[in-house]
Image (tube, rainbow, N blue to C red):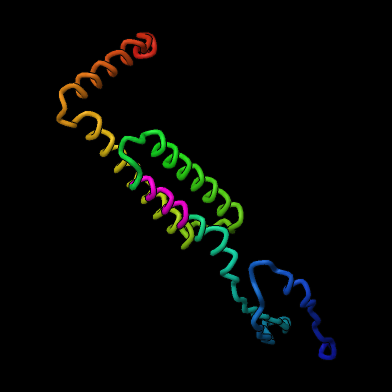
């Protein structure tokens, strides 16, 4: 009865996928028998290859460059506090932007993807750089061994603490 009817498929729509290219497909016919009737079934398996260049250029390379930028802060002068803070904050905010962009481009899944793991490794590296900066800043400013510098720094801290309104602390 229906054996002379074929199945047609439009390949143009499949070839327009931005992140994939179809490398092949397989067609399977089967007949499912029940007590009352026989049902024909058609199964088509599509095989795709993901274009990795998109993720490489939009996520992996920028994340790597941001981590390298944060490492540059390790080589700056230890007295250049503003420069280090600026590089650290810029790096973290840019990583947040890239992480959010990666989530908007990816399908919603309930497990971490390779890109998620890579971004978290980059976050961890940025955090380690910021901790290193904090340790260097602390020991540079407060443990120099020079009593005059220590006295000046203690006085600066006292003045800053005096300027804080007491109502802000008591809330």
Q: Residue at x 66, y 78 (%)?
A: 22
Q: Is residue 65 magenta?
A: yes
| Residue 30 showing in the rendered view | no
User: What is the tally of numbered marks visible in this picture?
Assistant: 0
Q: Can the viewer see residue 113?
A: yes
- Lateral position of residue 164 relative to residue 93, left or right: left
119 left or right of 75 in image: right
Q: Work out whether 160 lies above or below 127.
A: above
> How far from the left and from the top, in percent, is residue 10?
80, 76
Q: Pick whichever, 109 or 120, lies toward us.
A: 120
Residue at the image position 73 percent from the left and 83 percent from the top:
40
- Quarter occupied by residue 46: bottom right
Work out whether 8 lies above or below 18: below
Residue 44 included in the magenta stretch of the image:
no
Residue 104 relative to residue 158: left or right: right
The residue lying at 36 percent from left, 13 percent from top is 164
Front one among 82 and 109: 82
Query: At 81% across and 81% down in the image, what residue appears?
Result: 8
44 or 25, nearer to the observer: 25
| Vertical relation: 2 (above or below) 163 | below
Q: Nearer the viewer, residue 84 or 128?
A: 84
Magenta stretch, main secondary structure, is helix
Residue range highlighted in magenta:
64-74
Place of residue 158 in the rendered image (x, y in percent of width and height, measured from the top left): 27, 14
**x, y percent for residue 141:** 25, 30
Residue 148 pos. (x, y %) = 18, 21
Quarter holding the N terminus is bottom right
Q: Quadrant of the C terminus?
A: top left
């Amino acid at each position: 009865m229906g054996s002379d009817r074929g199945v047609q498929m439009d390949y143009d729509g499949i070839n327009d996928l931005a992140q994939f290219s179809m490398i092949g497909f397989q067609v399977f016919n089967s007949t499912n028998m029940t007590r009352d009737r026989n049902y024909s079934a058609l199964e088509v398996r599509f095989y795709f290859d993901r274009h990795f260049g998109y993720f490489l250029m939009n996520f992996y390379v920028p994340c790597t460059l941001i981590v390298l930028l944060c490492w540059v802060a390790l080589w700056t002068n230890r007295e250049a506090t503003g420069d280090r803070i600026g590089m650290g904050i810029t790096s973290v905010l840019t990583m947040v932007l890239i992480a959010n962009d990666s989530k908007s481009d990816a399908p919603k899944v309930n497990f971490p993807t390779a890109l998620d793991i890579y971004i978290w490794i980059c976050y961890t590296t940025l955090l380690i750089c910021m901790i290193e900066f904090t340790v260097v800043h602390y020991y540079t400013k407060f443990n120099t061994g020079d009593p005059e510098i220590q006295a000046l720094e203690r006085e600066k801290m006292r003045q800053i603490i005096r300027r804080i309104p007491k109502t802000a602390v008591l809330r």
